Image (tube, grey):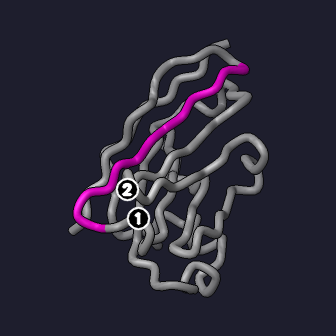
Amino acid sequence: QGQLEESGGGSVQSGGSLRLSCKASDFPVSRHCVGWFRQVPGNKRDGVAIIDSNGNTYYAASLEGHVTISRDEGENTVDLQMNSLKPPDTAMYYCAARVCPPGYGKVLGGRLLLDSNTMEYWGKGTLVTISD
């Protein structure tokens, strides 16, 4: 089973930026759909952004324009750049992945890819805190 490890979380003031990184072990990110989810206590885990094996990207509608997902196949990492952060963005951010043959990301589509039930592997999370 693949392993994922997140890094880059922390505390920033409103309006600031953070870059989260997800390092995959035991499997190539280039052959998986990999992305980011976030969760606050008492709420479900919501999809933020996904990049599929073809490099297509999918974003939660409410976050598009404020976050950018990217992949480094040499480092086997998937990063999430977050800008213009606000206190409601405070959450635990999780990296997740699933096996994704070429073209499968388009078959599933953004709605399913951004559903936490679609993912197979999960990291332990990194905390992001945004203060006023």
Q: How many marks?
A: 2
Residue 96 in picture, x, y percent from top left: 41, 58
Q: Is residue 37 left or right of residue 86?
A: left
User: What kind of element bears circle 2?
Assistant: loop
Q: Residue at x 21, y 69 (%)?
A: 1
Residue under numbered circle 1: 29
Q: Residue at x 40, y 47 (%)?
A: 22
Asked if one can make out residue 41 in the rendered structure from this viewpoint, the answer is no
Which secondary structure is most common in the magenta stretch?
strand
Residue 48 falls inside the magenta stretch: no
Q: Is residue 81 left or right of residue 3?
A: right
Residue 25 falls inside the magenta stretch: yes
Q: Which residues are magenta?
A: 15-27
Residue type for callout 1: Val
Looking at marks 1 and 2 on the same chain, the residue that comes earlier in the sequence is marked by 1
Above or below, comparing residue 74 to residue 11 in the picture: below
Residue under numbered circle 2: 76
How far apart are the two marked residues, 1 and 2, measured between alpha carbons?
A: 6 Å
